[in-house]
Image (cartoon, rainbow, N blue to C red):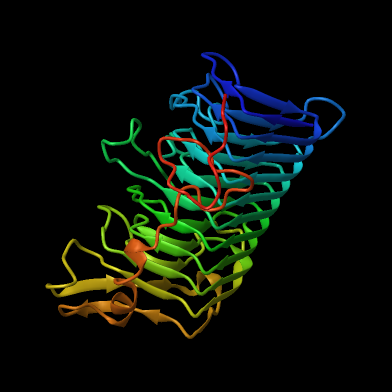
Amino acid sequence: KTFSNYRISTVSGDCVVIDGATNVTFQNSDIGPCGYHAIHITTTSDTVSSGVDIVDSYLHTENKPTAATCCDLNEGVNVELGSHDILIQGNVIAFNESNVELIDSDHVSVIGNYLLNPLGPFPRGQNVQAINSKNVTVVNNFTQASTDAKYPFPANQEDSINFYATTTGLAQGNYVTGGTSNSGCGIIADDRAEAMQFLDNTLFDSGQCGIGISSGSHHLVTGNRVLDLTPIAGGGNVGIYVTNFAAPYPCSAITIKNNTASAILLACNPAIDTCSYNGYGDDPSCGVIATSGNTFDFDDIGPGGGSAYEALIGTVPSAAPLIPPGPRGCVAVSPYTTQTSLPRCNVN
């Protein structure tokens, strides 16, 4: 069953509920504002939701719970309770508690979306978060957190892409920018994450940490580019780190190779100042880290920056893709759309 060309808004409840449904496509629509989730994929019957595609739509609840009522009330797409084989592609998803929240789900692909200004509050506030899930793919998305007044709702982001207690995850080819949390990262393998692959992502000013490995085992981090020029007060301000923050849960068998990372510790202008850099850090809590082929800036470096900064400054800030990066059948209509590879969707 395919549902197309809808405009849906409500002051109470979810805008769209897909409950115990199989082989459903929801596309080319404008969903929001909403009292609760924009799209809620769930299971309250004997049938588990599966084979659901959410594509080429603008999803914006423009709402968030209070700290007292958090969490999981006002997400752009909420997938839960065993739902599986879900595709979220080519959407503009903005101004939600978390833009995409996956809980107890399996085989979910988040591909080619523009994800803007998650609203939180902590512990939510992610562009994509997977909790107690498996086989999660996050590929070729543009994720952004901004407090610029041109956006009607400023970001309250924790991590941009977060894998928590999740097994077998892939984050590849994403452009990740923005974030002011002193504990958040652009991309993170969080508590009890297992078998993460972080491949060929580009992160620019993504907060106090570009890529974090804070728990788990058999993670591969390779081919990523991290440039952080805006240090966060009270943060670690590191390009890539490996440290077990979830002990006594284990952390081991980590590979960090062929990455380029430059992050400054204190506010300065690398073009003209001597700056202190912290491109990478690890400690014994995750055992021996397999590292090779990386380019990291460390310690004090004079004007012009280190080799990582020099390699990244000319390309990373300007590498943001068109919005949304990967439409499927037509280009989602939103205030932020810039993509021209396909015609605009026809929303009634």
Q: Quadrant of the N terminus?
A: top right
Specify the quadrant of the image occupied by residue 39: top right
Taking the spot 49% from the left edge, 30% from the top edge, the residue there is: 60
Count of labels shown?
Answer: 0
Q: Position of residue 295 (x, y in %)?
A: 39, 81
Residue at the outermost front position: 343
**Is 131 rendered above or below residue 119?**
below
- Residue 125, visible in the rendered structure: yes
Q: Position of residue 219 (x, y in %)?
A: 60, 68
Residue at the outermost bottom position: 293
**Is 107 rendered above or below residue 249?**
above
Specify the quadrant of the image occupied by residue 62: top left
Residue at the outermost top position: 11
**Is 36 rendered above or below residue 11?**
below
Residue sitting nearer the eye, 211 or 310: 310
Residue at the outermost right position: 46
Residue sitting nearer the eye, 333 or 242: 333
Q: Position of residue 197 (x, y in %)?
A: 61, 66
